[in-house]
Image (cartoon, grey):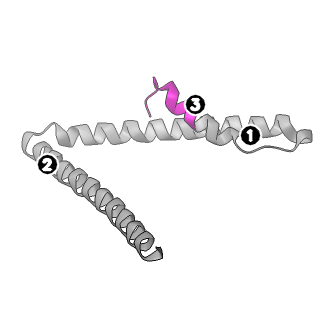
């Protein structure tokens, strides 16, 4: 999540606002939700910042950086392929069941 990404904060806010507090404790419930949301935002952004600084140091070297990029490209390709295969098998199973039902 980037600091300049209000859509991400809106999406997280929707998740937090989905749960209702008791009407008598509405103010307290809202205050707790806002504090938890702020904490999550600060922790997530700080973690990404630390990860980015560390990862930049590795990626700025030519050989390790290129090797990591290749590994990530292969992993991305594999995960997309697994996702497509999973959906294909679910669809094929569904079609086979429908054929046998009549």
Q: Position of residue 46 (x, y in %)?
A: 45, 37
Residue 64: x %, y % from top left: 12, 47
- Where is mark 2, residue-wise? 70
The answer to whether 42 appears left or right of 89 in the picture is right
Q: Which residues are magenta?
A: 1-11
Q: Are marks 3 and 2 in contact (CB under 8 Å)?
A: no
**Label 1: few (<14), some (14–19) or many (≥20) C-alpha neighbours in 10 Å:** few
Disc 1, SS: helix
Check residue 3 for magenta coloring. Answer: yes
Report the Cα–Cα distance between label 1 and label 3: 17 Å
Residue extending furthest toward the bottom: 100
Q: CA distance from mark 3 to mark 2?
A: 34 Å
> What residue is disc 3 on?
10
Residue pointed to by mark 1: 32
First along the sequence among labels 1 and 3: 3
Decide: few, some or many residues near mark 2? Use Cα within 10 Å; few <14, some 14-19, many ≥20.
few
Helix, strand or loop at label 3? It is helix
Q: Nearer the viewer, residue 52 or 13?
A: 13
Magenta stretch contains residue 60: no
Q: Which percent across, then down, holds residue 92?
A: 35, 66
Residue in the image at 40% along x and 71% along y: 99
């Amino acid at each position: 999540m980037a600091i300049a990404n209000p859509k991400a904060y809106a999406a997280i806010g929707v998740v937090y606002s989905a749960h209702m507090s008791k009407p008598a404790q509405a103010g307290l419930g809202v205050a707790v939700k806002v504090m938890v949301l702020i904490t999550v935002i600060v922790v997530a952004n700080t973690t990404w910042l630390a990860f980015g600084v560390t990862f930049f140091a590795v990626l700025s070297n030519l050989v390790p950086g290129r090797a990591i990029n290749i590994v990530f490209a292969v992993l991305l390709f594999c995960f997309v392929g697994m996702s497509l295969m999973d959906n294909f098998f679910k669809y094929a199973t569904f079609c086979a069941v429908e054929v046998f039902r009549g």
